[in-house]
Image (cartoon, grey):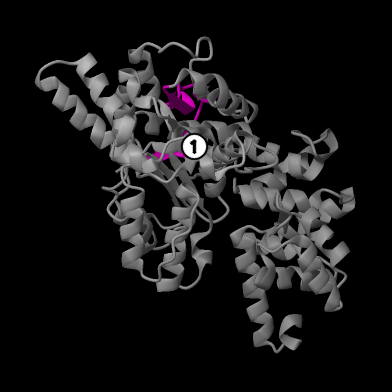
């Protein structure tokens, strides 16, 4: 197991590396008339959707060089095969098809068949004129026993391709409807959406990401398992998200499973939930199982040999990894698994290839991060410099502490900021909970709202939560806004409430402590 420390980072620029996949989609078709009509409309729609597509746009009436086709197929995530009545008249198309199925079976590349005015049965079993044309093509292209070898290979490829769920043009009123359906499916499978990382990234984030990326790039043909290890609030998830955003387009499928410990108590139901999460992220479809064993079998069968990127955040038990990934032998070459954890023994049990230890941020980066959150700029004013440096040093390089305190100080007067530092300075044993208690100088109702959200409403839509809390007598419209401004609650792109797991954990602990003193939740009283 190789170890690296974040303190060893020196560069602040990202690596520029060529992705394994050059294209999102390859379109295979044989009939010139279909190329001029249906395929040209499909290609145009894919381009409008910003899907990088390989096709002969200069001259659809002629076959491209086969060698160029083969290289493109190898470096494409999704192949759309347009089967038509005359598809088997082209040896080039049949050889392409062989290559497509080879990549599908060996590396998990995705195949989407379209049956254009031909039955899937005729394609799969090469019946009628479709089968006769294939035989004629084989005899034109080969001689002797090579004819039978070619027919055998092409028959197997057709059988496999036509057995994959696709589209029949006769199921649609017009070509435009089918084109829209295909493009929608392609976009769903590609799912090009970056994760939100942080409002104020500092240079150190880039250099930390680069350290891990360098290691991954040196393991192109292996299954690479990376561990990111550090204390709560050290920025493990932030680094994992940045790595994910940098490289996810290079994989057939990807999954980022956040806050695994929040899936519930370790039992059959919660573990099957993890498996379902992975399956949906990669294939965009749910499986309905109630057994861990069956779930793992389905994952290994349906995702076998695909080049995947899997991120497991906040793992605290080896079993959580094993339930999702098993022995990793089913994963395709070049797959990457990233695990964040507070417990290095978990990484030892998993036998990761590389452990990245999250050390605290240095003095300059700590000051920059605090300043962005506290003052809205990368450096404090001269009259705030000493105060800011003292508070940054107190946080000991812990990003969450810097963000939390910075957000709390944002709208404070100079006297109020100095008062906060005075309180911090009287707290000799620094920890996040101490900082949270200081930041918890909220109105009683705002504190109640925070604790209610911690216990019941993470992941719920903001408007829905506001309505419920208002009905309970809390002024949630204002209260939730205050908590967002203090950095205690976040709202995602879907307007759902989010919170750092540590803050949620602390909130729940405060609620339990209140209950022990006979002070229950408002929800409990209702």
For the point 71% across and 46% down, which residue is it?
A: 390
Q: Quadrant of residue 275?
A: bottom left
Image coordinates for residue 431, horizontal then vertical, percent? 61, 60
Q: Which residue is mark 1?
A: 248
Residue 29 is one of the magenta-drawn residues: yes
Figure label count: 1
Q: Nearer the viewer, residue 194 or 219?
A: 194
Image coordinates for residue 366, horizontal then vertical, percent? 65, 40
The quadrant the C terminus occupies is: bottom right
- Tell me if I can see residue 89 in this picture: yes
Image coordinates for residue 172, horizontal then vertical, percent? 58, 42
For the point 69% across and 60% down, which residue is it?
A: 435
Left/right placement of residue 25 relative to residue 99 reads: right
Left/right placement of residue 258 relative to residue 75 reads: right
Q: Nearer the viewer, residue 102 or 458?
A: 102
Part of the protein shown in magenta: 3-30
Residue 478 is one of the magenta-drawn residues: no
The quadrant the N terminus occupies is: top left
For the point 46% across and 48% down, which residue is it?
A: 283
Residue 480, above or below 302: below
Q: Nearer the viewer, residue 357 or 445?
A: 445
Q: Quadrant of residue 368?
A: top right
Left/right placement of residue 453 relative to residue 52 reads: right
In the structure shown, which secondary structural element does the residue marked by tag 1 occupy?
helix
Image coordinates for residue 341, horizontal then vertical, percent? 45, 55
Q: Residues within 10 Å of mark 1 (few under 14, many from 20)?
A: many
Residue 522, above or below 95: below
- Tell me if I can see residue 219 in this picture: no
For the point 62% across and 74% down, which residue is it?
A: 509
């Amino acid at each position: 197991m190789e170890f690296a420390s974040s303190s060893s980072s020196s560069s602040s620029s990202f690596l520029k590396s060529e992705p394994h996949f050059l294209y999102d989609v390859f379109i295979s078709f044989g009939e010139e008339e279909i190329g001029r009509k249906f395929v040209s409309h499909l290609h145009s729609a894919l381009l409008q959707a910003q899907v990088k597509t390989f096709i002969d746009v200069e001259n659809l009436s002629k076959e491209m060089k086969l060698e160029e086709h083969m290289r493109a197929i190898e470096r494409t995530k999704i192949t759309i095969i347009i089967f038509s009545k005359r598809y088997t008249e082209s040896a080039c198309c049949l050889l392409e098809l062989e290559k497509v199925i080879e990549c599908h079976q060996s590396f998990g590349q995705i195949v989407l068949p379209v049956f254009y005015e031909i039955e899937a049965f005729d394609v799969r079993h090469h019946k009628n004129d479709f089968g006769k044309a294939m035989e004629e093509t084989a005899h034109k292209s080969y001689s002797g026993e090579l004819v039978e070898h070619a027919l055998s290979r092409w028959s197997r490829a057709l059988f496999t391709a036509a057995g994959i769920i696709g589209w029949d043009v006769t199921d649609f009123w017009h070509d435009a409807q089918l084109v829209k359906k295909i493009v929608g499916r392609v976009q769903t499978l590609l799912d090009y959406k970056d994760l939100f990382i942080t409002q104020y990234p500092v240079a150190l984030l880039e250099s930390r990401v680069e350290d891990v990326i360098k290691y991954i790039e040196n393991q192109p043909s292996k299954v690479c398992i990376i561990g990111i290890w550090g204390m709560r609030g050290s920025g493990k998830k932030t680094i994992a998200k940045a790595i994910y955003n940098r490289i996810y387009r290079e994989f057939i499928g990807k999954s980022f499973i956040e806050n695994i410990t929040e899936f519930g108590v370790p039992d059959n139901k919660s573990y099957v939930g993890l498996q379902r999460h992975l399956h949906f992220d990669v294939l965009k479809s749910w499986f309905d199982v109630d057994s861990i064993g069956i779930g793992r079998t389905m994952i290994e069968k349906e995702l076998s040999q695909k080049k995947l990127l899997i991120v497991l955040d906040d793992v605290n038990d080896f079993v959580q990894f094993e339930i999702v990934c098993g022995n990793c032998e089913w994963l395709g070459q070049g797959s990457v698994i990233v695990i964040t954890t507070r417990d290095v023994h978990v990484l030892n049990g998993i036998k990761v290839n590389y452990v990245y230890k999250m050390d605290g941020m240095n003095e300059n980066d700590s000051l920059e991060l605090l300043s962005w959150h506290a003052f809205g700029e990368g450096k404090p004013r001269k009259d705030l410099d000493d105060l800011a440096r003292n508070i940054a040093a107190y946080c000991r390089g812990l990003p969450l502490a810097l963000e939390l305190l910075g957000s709390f100080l944002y709208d404070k007067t100079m006297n109020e900021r100095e008062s906060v530092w005075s309180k911090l300075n009287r707290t000799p044993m620094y920890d996040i909970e101490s900082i949270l208690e200081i930041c918890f100088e909220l109105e009683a109702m705002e504190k109640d709202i925070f604790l209610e959200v911690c216990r019941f409403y993470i992941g719920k839509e903001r408007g829905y939560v506001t309505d419920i809390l208002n009905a309970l007598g809390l002024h949630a419209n204002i209260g939730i806004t205050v908590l967002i401004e203090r950095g205690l609650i976040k709202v995602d792109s879907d307007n759902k409430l989010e919170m750092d797991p540590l803050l949620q954990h602390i909130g729940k602990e405060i609620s339990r402590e209140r209950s022990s003193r006979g002070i229950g939740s408002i929800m409990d009283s209702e």
